[in-house]
Amino acid sequence: MAKERIVTRTATPGESAVEGAAATRAVRASDAYIAEIRPKRLQEYIGQKELVERLRIAITAAKKRGDAMEHVLLHGPPGLGKTTIAHVIAEEMGSRAFVTSGPALTKAGDLVGTLTKMHANDVLFIDEIHRLPAAVEEYIYPAMEDRRIDFTLDSGMHAKVVTLNLEPFTMIGATTRAGLLTNALRSRFGIAHHLEFYNEADLQRILQRATGILSMTGVDADALAAIACRSRGTPRIAIRLLRRVRDYAQVMGTGHCTAESVMKALALEGVDALGLDELDRKYLRVIAQTYGGGPVGLEAIAATLADDAATLEDAIEPYLLQLGFLARTRQGRCLTKSACEYLGVEFKSESLLGGS
Ligand code: ADE
């Protein structure tokens, strides 16, 4: 059955990002405090040096050409600044960021609604892009490549393909699971970058900057160092801990943020000297006590903890791997010797770790 191409038009510039499609938010209200602390410009961005340099070049080149910036795929553990980078790119381009997520875009209409509201050089940030339904993903390919959406009206012999031309835009896809993306989608991003955990010096600088924005006074440098080394390489965690320490110092102390108030406040939060919290410790203890140190499959650990396997894989395991506490072998997850020392349990055998 032949499909008739009947109409081509340029999408009308729509309302502001705040009034975007229901599935799209310009800002998360509950993240208002993060928005206030987030760097707005590349120059203010601390850490991720290589990415910042790549973006600086791509943004400058796009502005010189008077075009939208390349599509960018960001992957890595949660809390490392993927959303922040999308907002920074929009700010640098003098445009707006529309924020949505793979699971929120349940049907093609959600995507079309947002794309047709966007002005030239706006940014569309899709979080958890690996969870985009296949039926929506199909519409993304021509949108990214040819700035065009084709959709079919009616069916059978009356079917018509309607083409909407889009303004130049930048898609920023974020994922904790780059491996789950189809090759077709991955290959349409001009820039793909893996975000690394931040080192302690960068986290300390991020915390220092945040104390200014939060109007905190009487903050000792060694207090910030103590928070930084308990933040699991993650700015989002560092800022959250800073706020807990601020509350603690205000209510229980003199209002001054000292290394001592950090220790006390974080002990109350269940965060130890390595930055591990109760869920991390439960995860490690399940492998040690229920599964004899491993190897054990992720699903079995998740079932024992009554938690979600994807959450453990995305939010708990990356830092334990980075710490060298966990090994992922072909047979399953195993505790390392240092994890056993940390838990004060006997380390069974090096040979278990041989098969990764
Ligand atoms: N606040 C949170 N993350 C930041 C970063 N990478 N640079 C500066 N400030 C931040």
Image (tube, rainbow, N blue to C red):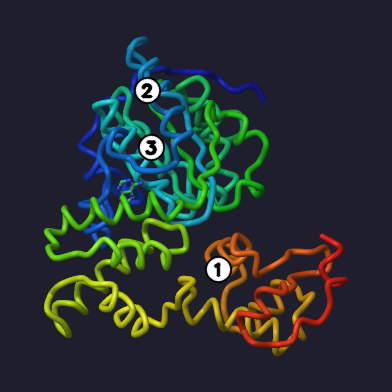
In this rendering, the answer to whether 287 lies above or below 155 is: below
Q: Secondary structure at mark 3?
A: strand
Calculate the distance from the C-alpha at mark 2 to the C-alpha at mark 3.
15 Å
* Nearest-to-viewer mark from 2 and 3: 2
Reading the image, the residue beneath label 1 is 316
Q: Position of residue 148 (x, y in %)?
A: 46, 23
Q: Earlier in the sequence, mark 1 or mark 2?
A: 2
Q: Position of residue 311 (x, y in %)?
A: 55, 67
Looking at the rendered structure, the kind of residue marked 3 is: Leu
Calculate the distance from the C-alpha at mark 3 to the C-alpha at mark 1.
28 Å
Q: Quadrant of the N terminus?
A: top right
Calculate the distance from the C-alpha at mark 1 to the C-alpha at mark 2.
34 Å
Q: Name the residue at 48% across, 55% down.
A: 103
Whether residue 159 can be seen here = no
Reading the image, the residue beneath label 3 is 124
In this rendering, the answer to whether 316 lies above or below 11 is: below
Q: Secondary structure at mark 2?
A: helix
Labelled pair 3, 1 in contact (Cβ < 8 Å): no
